[in-house]
Image (cartoon, helix red, strand yellow):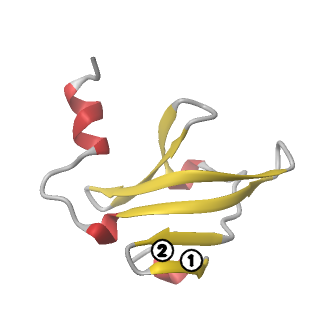
Amino acid sequence: MPSPSTSRCVNPAPSRTDDLRLVIVPDVRRRADHAVVAVRFEGEWLILDNRHLALVNAIETQHYSPLFVMDHRGVAEFNIAEFRR
């Protein structure tokens, strides 16, 4: 059973569609493209990466260089200014 803090991060309430994104990144360490989930929680972007089974702050994921972002509006090329909103 997930801990209350984990459940709260993955499924925050109230939920906003602007706070959840699927991000396609080339993982330079593995030399392969990879999808991660990004969720904004308490003003910070957190990355859920199933390869590492971890939820980490986006600032700590320096080995990723995002290419595309998918959200409720569709698919777009990654734009750091847009992601920081």
Task: Please tell me how crowded label 2 is: few (under 14), some (14-19), or many (20+) other residues with Cα within 10 Å.
Answer: some
Residue 26 in the image: x percent, y percent?
A: 76, 57
Residue most toward the right?
31
Q: Where does label 2 land, which residue?
A: 83
Tell me how far mark 2 sits from mark 1, CA to CA: 5 Å
Q: Toward the viewer: 14 or 80? A: 14
Q: Where does label 1 land, which residue?
A: 80
Apparent side of residue 5 relative to residue 50 in the rendered image (left or right): left
> Secondary structure beneath disc 2?
helix
Q: Toward the viewer: 40 or 2? A: 2
Relative to 10, is 76 above or below?
A: below
Locate the C terminus by quadrant.
bottom left
Residue 41 in the image: x percent, y percent?
A: 29, 54
Residue at image x 22%, y 40%?
Answer: 8
Residue 70 in the image: x percent, y percent?
A: 51, 70
Relative to 71, is 41 above or below?
A: above
Residue at image x 25%, y 34%?
Answer: 7
Apparent side of residue 53 relative to residue 41 in the rendered image (left or right): right
